[in-house]
Amino acid sequence: MTVRIKFCGAAGTVTGSCYWIQTADRQFLVDCGLFQGTKTVKELNYGDFPFNPVEIDFVLVTHAHADHGAMIPKLIKAGFDGPVYATAATRDLLSYMLPDSGYIQEVEVERLNRRNQQRGKAAVQPIYTRKDAEASISQIHPVEFEDWLTPETGIRARFWNAGHILGAASVELEIEDGRDTLRLLFSGDIGPDNKLFHDDPEAPSDLDYVFCESTYGGRFRDPITAFQRRDILAREISSAMRAGGALVIPSFAVERTQELLLDIDHLLDQNEINCSAVFLDSPLAIRITSVFREHLADLADVETGEHPFRNPKFHFTESVDESKAIARFTGGVIILAASGMCDAGRIRHHLKNHLWRPESTVLLVGYQAEGTLGRMLEKGFKKVRIQGEEIKVHARIRSIDTYSGHADGHELVAWLKAREPVRQGIFLTHGSRESLAALASDLQEQGVKKDHIVIPELDDMYELTKSGYTKRQRGVFRRIAAEAVDRPDWHNDLAQLTLDIRSSLEHLPDAQKKRLLSRLKKALRGAS
C-alpha cells in the first residue's frame, strides 16, 4: 500500500495549513487554511489550489483558526461538494469566523480597488464573499472526540483533544487496503500543558507517521501558574495606565480574547488594576465569546454563572459608529481588537490612533508571523505604514508570551516522545526555518534518528508505505520559491525603503534632497 501526501501549506512557514492525501482510489485534505504574512505568501490565497477541488472526497479540520480552516469557502466555491468534518465547537466557531473572513475580504478588496482604479490597475476579486462563507457552513459536520469516523471505505479518523483552543483536535488516521493498515497522526496545533480552559493534550501512540507542528520549536517558557500569569498582566496594565495613555491589545478573536477578558475581570474584581473602561472592539470576538458561553461544560477554569465574561467596565462595540467613538478616549482605557497579528480588522484603526502617542502602550500577546505589522512592531520598527499612511512609532511596544496557545519546545518534544513508537517518520511542519531546525535538533538529542525526521518544503510530495517514505522528485510544481516562504519580501523592503528615504530627506537642505532624488532616479533607470 502506498499513500501520497503533498504539503500544500504550513511547510517552512507557520500559516496555510493544508495536507493533500491520496490513496489508491480516494483524495482528501487535513485542514484547508489561509496563508498569512508577506504579500508574496498571501497571494497564494488568490491562486488555484495545487489540486482539483472537484476530486476531493472529504476534509478533516483540526480547529477553527484561519490558517487551518478559512479556505473552506473557496474550496467549495471551486467545486468541492463533499463533507467537512470537525468537532462541534470548531463548527460553531467557523459558523461565525468564515462569514467574518468573507466580509473582511470584501471590505479590503473594495479599498484596494479604489486605489487600483486611481492608478489605472485592474480590479481584483475577493477570495470569497460573506455569502460564499455562509453557504459553506452546511457542509461542515460535527464529530465527537475519540469516536471513530469512517468517511470512506478503508479510511477511519478519530479526533483527540489538542488543548490549543476550544474544539481543537489532533487527527488520527487509519488507511487500509485489505492487507495493511497505515497509521498516521496529524497534530494540528498542540496547546501547552496547564492551559486555561483546556485539559492537557491527548493522542494515541504506536504509529507509522506523525505530522507535527513546530511553531515554538527551540523556544522555552518557564512553567507558569494562573496567579503568575495574572500578575504579569496586572503589571503591564498598571504600567500602561501610569503612562497616561490607552492600552491597545491586538488580540486573536478565538480563545486569546476570552482568556484576557477572564483575567481582566478577575483583576478588576480584586482591585489589582484600575481603568476607566475595557472595550472589546471586534464583532467576531463578541460572537465567539457567545460560543464559549454555549460550551461552558467543555471548559475548565471557568466559574459557571449567567455570563462568565460580564463586568460593568466591559463594553462590547459591534457597530462602526461605536468603534469610531472609542477614539475619543486617549487614556485610562484598555482596547482589545482583532486581529492578533495586526494585519486586518479594526485593530489597524486603533494603532493609527495610538502608535504615534508616546503615552500609549501596545501589548502583543501572541505569535507574530513574518511580514505582518505585528512582527514589525515586535522587531522595533520606528516607522510603519498602515492603510497607505506613514505612522511614526512613539508608543511603548510590549510583548508577553504567557497566553500562548502553543506548546513550547520542551512540550513538543515530550508530546512527540509520548507517541512512540513512530516506526517510519516524523514530519515537522507549521514553523519557521529556525523553529523547525531547533525542534529537529532537540528530537535528535532525545534519541530520534536524523533520517527519521523530515522537514518538507512547500509543495513537496512524499510516498508513504509501511516500510518507509520516499520523496517524489518529478512532476512537483512549486508555486513560490522555498526561500520566499518565511522571509520578508520585496514589498516589505520597498515599504521600509520608502520610509527610510522620507526620513533621510526630512533632515537635508532642499539642494541635497534634489541631488539625492536625482541619484535614486538614475539608479532606477540603470536597473531597468
Image (tube, rainbow, N blue to C red):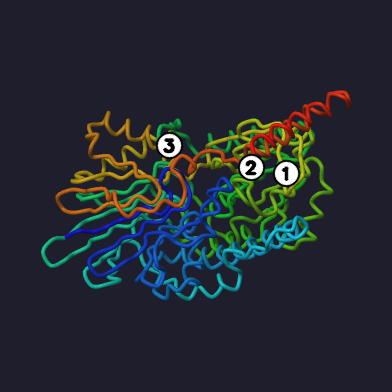
Cα separation, mark 3 vs mark 2, equals 20 Å
Instruction: Name the side, left or right, on which 126 lies relative to 210.
Output: right
Q: Which image quarter: residue 59?
A: bottom left
- Crowding at mark 2 (Cα within 10 Å: few <14, some 14-19, many 20+): many
Report the mark closest to the observer, 2 or 1: 2
Report the mark closest to the observer, 1 or 3: 3
Amino acid on which the number 1 mark rests in the picture: Leu
Q: Mark on residue 351? A: 1
Q: Sequence order check: which comes first, mark 3 or mark 2?
A: 2
Q: Which image quarter: residue 84?
A: bottom left
Q: Nearer the viewer, residue 340 or 109?
A: 109
* 207 up-or-down from 59: above or below: above
Place of residue 462 in the rendered image (x, y in percent of width and height, measured from the top left): 28, 51
Give the residue pinned by disc 3.
Answer: 433
Q: Mark on residue 388? A: none
Give the residue pinned by disc 2.
Answer: 373
